[in-house]
């Protein structure tokens, strides 16, 4: 497993190793959700690359960029059993050299939900993912369903820019109580960690109401808000019942919807979602 810190190292290694490549882009602090994507990439490609880069351009001022966990040695140990060919762990200066001024902006899909709460976030995501695709040149790239809006944005970007990359989406991996695995879960106190299980309960309540025949978007959003309101440690930023393709809120659901939410527990902000289909 080569640990590359420079773009030139990655390109030289790629040139020597012909065949299909799968890329798993991460910000490190790996968990079983990431590793499930690595395992899938290993099964579906001749070569596998994992990027580990805490991307500064997707963090707002005053956010948790500085304290975001960066346990690189632990991450490398976790990747060893998967026979990963290449780990790309660049510095910010390598990815954003002096006078950097080119960004990728996906328009409509970045406006609601996370885009409304985190202005500029998806510009940073789209830019760094485009750069990673250009550097690693993968045939397939692997992302988790937990970041549903990110997946939608990246798929749109790939279509619009004619990037020769297949986007593969893996299911959200969860703890025993339903909490979606996330690198930010380490910030939770024991009481907050217990309380955070309410996200999945709220999503499941809306899913169950949908499968029992409820099709009113606002009523389903109210179901989620009602469950979240039972947890005093939860501070709700948004709940959504949206079209999975456009991410626009639905007043009446025909056959499918994306239920999603962002909720704070103390200073820790968590997101989660469920896709429901009639």
Image (cartoon, rainbow, N blue to C red):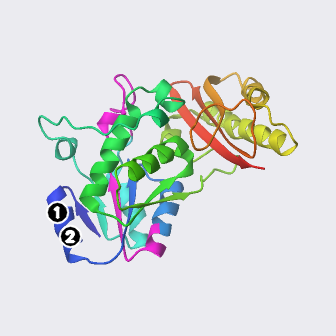
Q: Do the residues under discs 2 and 1 have CB atoms within 8 angstroms?
A: yes
Residue 218's x, y, as percent? Answer: 75, 26
Residue 191's x, y, as percent? Answer: 64, 31
Residue 131's x, y, as percent? Answer: 27, 50
Q: Label 1: few (<14), some or many (≥20) within 10 Å?
A: some
Q: Residue at x 60, y 33 (%)?
A: 248
Please give left or right for residue 246 compared with residue 200 in the image: left
Secondary structure category for the residue under label 1? helix
Residue 178 visible in this rendered orientation of the protein: no
Confirm whether the magenta stretch covers residue 55. Answer: yes
Q: Which mark is residue 186?
A: none
Confirm whether the magenta stretch covers residue 104. Answer: no
Magenta span of residues: 41-68
Residue 133 visible in this rendered orientation of the protein: yes
Q: Is residue 89 above or below residue 56?
A: below
In the figure, residue 92 lies in which quadrant? top left
Q: Is residue 128 above or below residue 263?
A: below
Secondary structure category for the residue under label 2? helix
Q: Which residue is mark 2?
A: 13
Towards the viewer: 236 or 257: 257
Q: Which residue is mark 1?
A: 9
Please give left or right for residue 3 compared with residue 191 in the image: left
Q: Residue at x 48, y 29 (%)?
A: 111
Q: Label 2: few (<14), some or many (≥20) within 10 Å?
A: some
Q: Is residue 62 above or below residue 202?
A: above
């Amino acid at each position: 497993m080569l640990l590359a810190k420079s773009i030139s190292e990655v390109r030289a290694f790629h040139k020597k190793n012909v065949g299909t490549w799968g890329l798993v882009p991460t910000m490190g602090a790996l968990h079983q959700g990431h590793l499930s994507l690595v395992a899938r990439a290993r099964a579906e490609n001749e070569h596998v690359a994992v990027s580990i880069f805490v991307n500064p351009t997707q963090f707002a001022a005053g956010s948790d960029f500085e304290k975001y966990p960066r346990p690189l040695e632990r991450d490398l140990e976790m990747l060893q059993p998967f026979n990963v060919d290449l780990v790309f762990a660049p510095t910010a200066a390598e990815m954003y050299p002096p006078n950097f001024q080119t960004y990728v902006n996906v328009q409509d899909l970045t406006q609601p939900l996370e885009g409304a709460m985190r202005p500029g976030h998806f510009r940073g995501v789209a830019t760094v993912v485009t750069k990673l695709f250009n550097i690693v040149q993968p045939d397939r790239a692997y992302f988790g369903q937990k970041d549903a809006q990110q997946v939608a944005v990246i798929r749109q970007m790939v279509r619009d820019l004619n990037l020769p990359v297949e986007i593969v989406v893996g299911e959200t991996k969860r703890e025993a109580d339903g909490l979606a695995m996330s690198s930010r879960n380490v910030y939770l106190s024991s009481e907050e960690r217990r309380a955070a299980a309410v996200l999945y309960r709220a999503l499941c309540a809306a899913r169950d109401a949908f499968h029992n025949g409820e099709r009113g978007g606002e009523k389903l959003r109210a179901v989620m808000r009602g469950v979240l309101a039972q947890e005093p440690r939860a501070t709700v930023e948004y709940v959504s019942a949206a079209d999975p393709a456009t991410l626009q809120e639905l007043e009446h659901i025909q056959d499918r919807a994306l239920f999603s939410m962002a909720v704070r527990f103390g200073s820790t902000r968590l997101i989660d979602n469920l896709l429901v289909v009639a």
